[in-house]
Image: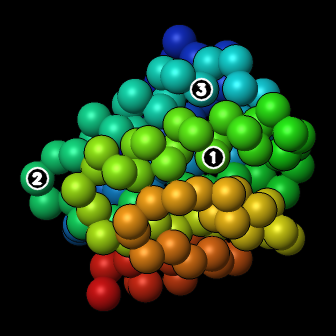
Amino acid sequence: MSQQQQSPFEYSFDKRDNVLVLDLTDWSGETEGMDEAERDWLSRASKSGVTAAVTEFSADMSLGRETQNHLAKEWSENGHEADIDKLAFVSEGIKARAVSANLDVPQEIKTFGSVAEAVEWASE
């Protein structure tokens, strides 16, 4: 697992077989500092052997209009650039569904309540 320290929030990646897992549970939902995490995600998701990605959010994350617009644009672009088949989003409540609903990507998208379930689905 690798940690990132220069962002205003902590995030980390884990690779489980062919699935890239991004832990964004420390992210408040503010778009400041997301560029670094997004570039890092795209670099890792584009590596050979990665066929799916799982992103975990906190139930406390704020999804205001600015954040939703940012994710819709930037994450949709990254989804088109990454050569992966599946995207999964994990959170308690509706945060994961709210994020996934705004994306325009070629991947199959599904939301989950746990990372374990998401990784199981993504690795199929």
Query: Quarter of the image containing the C terminus?
Result: bottom left
Please tell me which residue lies in front, 26 or 51: 51
Q: Residues within 10 Å of mark 2 (few under 14, many from 20)?
A: few
For badge 1, the amino acid type reads: Ala
Which residue is at 63% across, 46% downward?
72
- Answer with the quarter of the image where residue 91 lies: bottom right
Please determine whether, in this image, residue 19 is positioned above or below residue 41. Answer: below
Residue 118 shows in this picture: yes
On residue 39, the disc is: none
Whichever of callouts 3 and 1 sits on the residue coming sooner in the sequence is 3
**Residue with the mark numbered 2:** 48
**Residue with the mark numbered 3:** 34
Which residue is at 40% across, 52% downward?
79
Query: Which residue in the rendered view is the most extreme toward the top?
Result: 6
**Of helix, strand and loop, which one carries label 1?**
helix
**Of helix, strand and loop, which one carries label 3?**
helix
Answer with left or right where residue 96 lies relative to residue 15: right
Residue 9 percent coordinates (x, y): 67, 25
Whichever of callouts 1 and 2 sits on the residue coming sooner in the sequence is 2
Dot in front, 3 or 1: 1
**Of helix, strand and loop, which one carries label 2?**
loop
**Residue with the mark numbered 1:** 72
Residue 16 percent coordinates (x, y): 31, 64
